[in-house]
Image (tube, rainbow, N blue to C red):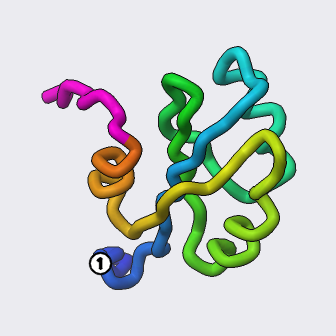
Amino acid sequence: MPKKLTKALRGKRRWIGCEVAGFSDRAELEGFLSDFPVKLYDFENQKCILMVKLEDFDDVRISINSDNIKTMTSSGKIRLVRERMEFSRKPRKR
C-alpha cells in the first residue's frame, strides 16, 4: 500500500493578488497568462488572484508585472490575499 501523502509532502504554493487592465473577461486574461506557470483562481472588478508553485514564485512575480498586470500582494494563504484585495466572499459548498 502506498504511503499517504501528508501535508508536508504536498507541493507548496503562493497566491498573488493583481490588478489588471485591458481585459474584458476571464477567458481573455487566461489566454494572456498561458505563457506563465500560473493558474487563475479569481477574477472580478479588474482584480485577479493567481496560484503559483513556490519554486516559480520569484520568477513569476518579477516577469508578470507589465502595463496590463500589476502585482499588489502575495501570501501562502488565499484567505489573506482575498481580504487584502477586497474580494467578495464566496459561499462554501458542503
Location of the C terminus (image quadrant)? top left
Q: How many marks?
A: 1
What's the magenta region?
A: 86-94
Q: Where is residue 82 in the image (x, y as percent from the top left)?
A: 34, 45
Above or below, 85 relative to 63:
above
* Residue at the spot 54% in from the left edge and 35% down from the top edge: 47
* Residue at the spot 35% in from the left edge and 75% down from the top edge: 5
Q: In which quarter of the image is residue 51?
A: bottom right
Identify residue type, mark 1.
Thr
Name the side, left or right, on which 77 lies relative to 17.
left
> Label 1, on which residue?
6
Q: Position of residue 70 (x, y in %)?
A: 67, 51
37 inside magenta stretch: no
Q: Position of residue 29 (x, y in %)?
A: 73, 31
* Residue at the spot 37% in from the left edge and 77% down from the top edge: 2
Kind of element beneath mark 1: loop
Name the side, left or right, on which 16 lies relative to 2.
right
Q: Quadrant of residue 20?
A: top right
